[in-house]
């Protein structure tokens, strides 16, 4: 097993900087997820680690070994792509065994590894089938099995679930997480889907325009985003943002959004007082906006009124699209809510869960 270290890694394609000065250390046996919008550099970061892209600047280590100039086949990694790239004329067994045969692995050892990997993935009964006889989920398992049989130090996965339907993706996420626990190997996973990232990763690295924004546990990313981009990217539906100013009125720090004025909770007043007079962005997640009749007990509420534009009944909750004079935002209400399209309803903001960002730098103000 091995750790992975990116040390000031940059990748340029002509004038375009795909990855900029990336530094991150992935612990041995960790499950790290690179996440971000399309074009943010996450796949390029993975491909540099695999040796499929040359590094423009910086170093990459697998364990203590510098691998900048090491051929992909000698890096002791295995990669699963979005395209499973199975050989259509070969059986499942032969697809999984192909790489081992190229390495002149003894026949008995190939048989052991393939059978063992098939047992882990539950595809023993499929070993004699051709890829065209498999479902999408089964092909995905074969591609993962082909990586397992190599017994690599590091697994690299580049959006391996993108071709699956929604239900199968949920199942496959759980299977890959269980596989990581069972194998005890370092996994580095790339996805644009923040739900995949939150549910699978022990840590998540958020990238935007080639720049690393934040690396942390899923819960800390959700609770303590370092900037507006991370706050808006992590969470579904996305965080609501309101342009505002921090002001002091009668000795109390308030957030003035023009539509409404919120008083910052007493215990947080001193933290925000140095920023009075600044233009800020007030952020709050939809799950922290409630119908007051069904708000959780003990929260610090700020109540205002808003017009109901759309409601989406999800069974366990209602996603409500709300509108004030200057702002549109979402709340996630208890299904017993009386919110109706076209009506006006009171809404309660949970100020214990609010976020404030500097309007100019977009950095979080703690």
Image (spheres, grey):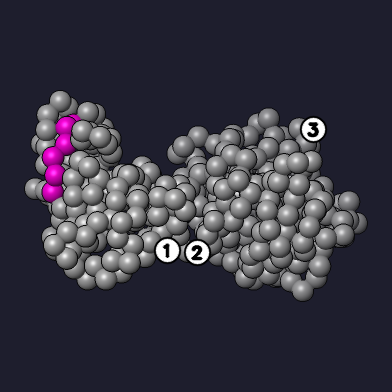
Q: Residue at x 32, y 44 (%)?
A: 243
> Who is closer to the viewer here, 32 or 102?
32
How far separated are the C-alphas under marks 2 and 3?
Answer: 44 Å
Q: Which quarter of the rendering shows the N terminus?
A: bottom right
Q: Which residue is mark 3?
A: 89
Q: Residue at x 25, y 35 (%)?
A: 326
In the rendering, which numbered label is found on residue 216?
Answer: 2
Crowding near pointer 3: few (<14 within 10 Å), some, many (20+)? few
Residue 140: image location, x then y, percent:
62, 42
Give the residues in magenta.
303-308
Residue 230: image location, x then y, percent:
46, 52
Q: Which quarter of the rendering shows the C terminus?
A: bottom left
Q: Which residue is mark 1?
A: 220
In-image side of 7 versus 209 (left or right): right
Front: mark 2 or 3: 2
Q: How many marks?
A: 3
**SS type, badge 1:** helix
Q: Earlier in the sequence, mark 2 or mark 3?
A: 3
Q: Earlier in the sequence, mark 3 or mark 1?
A: 3
Contact between marks 3 and 1 (CB within 8 A): the answer is no
Q: In the displayed image of the protein, which residue is found farthest to the bottom?
A: 64
């Amino acid at each position: 097993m091995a750790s992975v270290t990116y040390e000031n890694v940059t990748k340029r394609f002509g004038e375009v900087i795909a990855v900029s000065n990336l530094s991150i250390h992935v612990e041995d046996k960790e499950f790290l997820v690179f996440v971000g919008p399309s074009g943010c550099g996450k796949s390029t970061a993975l491909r540099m680690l695999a040796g499929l892209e040359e590094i423009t600047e910086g170093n990459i280590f697998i364990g203590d070994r510098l691998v900048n100039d090491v051929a992909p086949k000698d890096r002791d990694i295995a990669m699963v792509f979005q395209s499973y790239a199975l050989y259509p004329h070969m059986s499942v067994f032969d697809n999984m065994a192909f790489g081992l045969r190229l390495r002149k692995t003894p026949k008995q050892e190939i048989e052991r590894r393939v059978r063992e990997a098939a047992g882990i993935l539950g595809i023993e009964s499929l070993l004699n089938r051709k890829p065209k006889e498999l479902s999408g989920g089964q092909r995905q398992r074969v591609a993962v099995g082909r990586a397992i049989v190599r017994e690599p130090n590091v697994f690299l996965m580049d959006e391996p679930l993108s071709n699956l339907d929604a239900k199968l993706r949920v199942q496959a996420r759980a299977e890959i997480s269980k596989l990581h626990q069972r194998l005890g190997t370092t996994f580095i996973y790339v996805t644009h889907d923040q739900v995949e990232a939150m549910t699978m990763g022990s840590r998540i690295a958020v990238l935007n325009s080639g720049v690393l924004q934040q690396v942390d546990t899923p819960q800390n990313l959700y609770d303590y985003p370092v900037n507006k981009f991370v706050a808006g990217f992590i969470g579904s539906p996305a965080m609501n943002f309101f342009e505002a100013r921090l002001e002091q009125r009668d000795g109390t720090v308030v957030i003035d959004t023009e539509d409404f004025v919120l008083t910052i909770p007493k215990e947080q007043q001193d933290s925000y007082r140095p920023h009075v007079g600044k233009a800020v962005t007030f952020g709050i997640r939809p799950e922290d906006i409630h119908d007051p009749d069904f708000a959780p007990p003990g929260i610090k509420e700020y109540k205002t009124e808003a017009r109901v534009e759309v409601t989406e009944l999800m069974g366990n909750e209602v996603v409500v699209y709300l509108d004030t004079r200057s702002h549109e935002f979402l709340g996630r209400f208890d299904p017993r809510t009386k919110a109706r399209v076209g009506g006006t309803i009171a809404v309660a903001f949970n100020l214990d869960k609010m976020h404030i960002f500097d309007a100019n730098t977009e950095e979080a103000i703690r």
